[in-house]
Amino acid sequence: MMIPLRTFVKMMTEMLMLTYVDLSLNPERYTGYKGPSAHRIWRSIYQENCFRPKLNPYESFPYVLSSDLSNMCLEKRVFYRAVSGLHTSINIHLCSKYLLSEKGVGFAAPPEGEWGPNLDEFQRRFDPSQTLAEGPNWLKNLYFVYLLEMRALAKAGPYLEQEEYFTGNPTEDEETRGAIRNMLGVIYNFPDHFNESSMFSGGKQASMLKIEFREHFRNISRIMDCVGCDKCKLWGKLQTQGLGTALKILFSGQWDSPESEKQFSVKQRVKRLHRTEIVALFNAFARLSNSIRELENFRIMLSSHSESPKNVFGGVPNAAGKTLNVKKEECSSGGAKPRLGS
Ligand SMILES: Cc1cc2nc3c(=O)[nH]c(=O)nc-3n(C[C@H](O)[C@H](O)[C@H](O)COP(=O)(O)OP(=O)(O)OC[C@H]3O[C@@H](n4cnc5c(N)ncnc54)[C@H](O)[C@@H]3O)c2cc1C
């Protein structure tokens, strides 16, 4: 007898005492999680796990200032910018799906409360005047991590195209495969991919750094277990795993040689990614895409206000993807640098 997938998942989650969560019913949005607990999490992510500049004049300051990035080598900068981009994405989501009014009691008021974009909250978080001029850099980091994950999707594309995407419903399976092929087609044609080839190319020191990179990332994932808000933890962990999967694709070396392409064929298939990693990767990329769209909405809202949108968006590309300010620096890895101001 065939057991439907949903029933199987339900049985397994009960057996293993797991919780089954439908992501579509639990959108990432404002939850009210803030204050010391949220700060402790971000502080330990940056202070303990993001590499610090060698010459750090602000020893007691847990966060990294963008002006200090030039004191860090390429790989460490990439790590910081990816984490910061994820932080930006989380905060844009909470600004764009903000609880504007509490649960309504009147006839016309929505029972769930009113949710929508909160422009003041967005400005508080990203306006240079309120963020020691860091806000626009944090926004650029969102584009940075988006490009990094997009590159991982392109690199693992031939492998991902061969996946089965088993949902339990043959029509949905076919639709999923078609949608993934379509999306990968668009990604392959993107002209300005992140270029990871110059990273970790400096011999023994570079391989030690790679191990450190992996350890730091695992630690961030463990820290996410301490997030004191279930919905934030759910999305935080999912996006961290998605980013971790992207880094695995880019730096594990499994996708580097042209010969490895042959192993993508169904017959010779070598399992390289777990189902959960693929799910996390697609969902993480979807979150970043959504943040970029929401950012564009905020740009439009700001331009219809009297204040110039340039204040917040200085140097940040618009939806048409117009350029970031490219900054090239000397770094340990040598060779060609990843593009887009890494
Ligand atoms: C894993 C996780 C998931 C979360 N998910 C949600 C959620 O779904 N919904 C929700 O409402 N809240 C969520 N939060 C809380 C939210 O991210 C903020 O922590 C909270 O709103 C308080 O914001 P804040 O203005 O005090 O600054 P925080 O966002 O807490 O930032 C702390 C400090 O980090 C620095 N900083 C801020 N942004 C960046 C950046 N992009 N790059 C580098 N440094 C930066 C600044 O110096 C800032 O003062 C989550 C928190 C965590 C840790």
Image: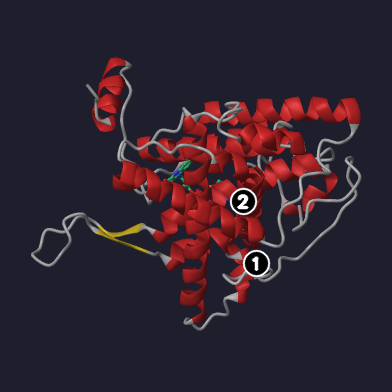
Q: CA distance from mark 2 to mark 1?
A: 18 Å
Q: Residue furthest front?
A: 267
- Looking at the picture, which amino acid does disc 1 mark? Val
> At which x and y percent is residue 201?
86, 36
Q: Is residue 88 left or right of residue 253?
A: left
The residue depicted at 52 percent of the width and 80 percent of the height is 303
Mark 2: secondary structure: helix
> At which x and y percent is residue 194?
72, 52
Q: Is residue 247 above or below residue 135?
A: above
Q: Earlier in the sequence, mark 2 or mark 1?
A: 2
> At which x and y percent is residue 42?
56, 39
The quarter of the picture where residue 250 lies is top right
Mark 1: secondary structure: loop
The residue depicted at 60 percent of the width and 71 percent of the height is 318
Residue under label 2, please give it: 150
Viewer can see residue 26? no
Q: How is the image coloured?
A: secondary structure
Relative depth, front residue between 270 and 283: 270
The quarter of the picture where residue 324 lies is bottom right
Residue under label 1, please give it: 316
- Looking at the picture, which amino acid does disc 2 mark? Met
Viewer can see residue 127? yes
The quarter of the picture where residue 255 lies is top right
Q: Is residue 207 above or below residue 156?
A: above
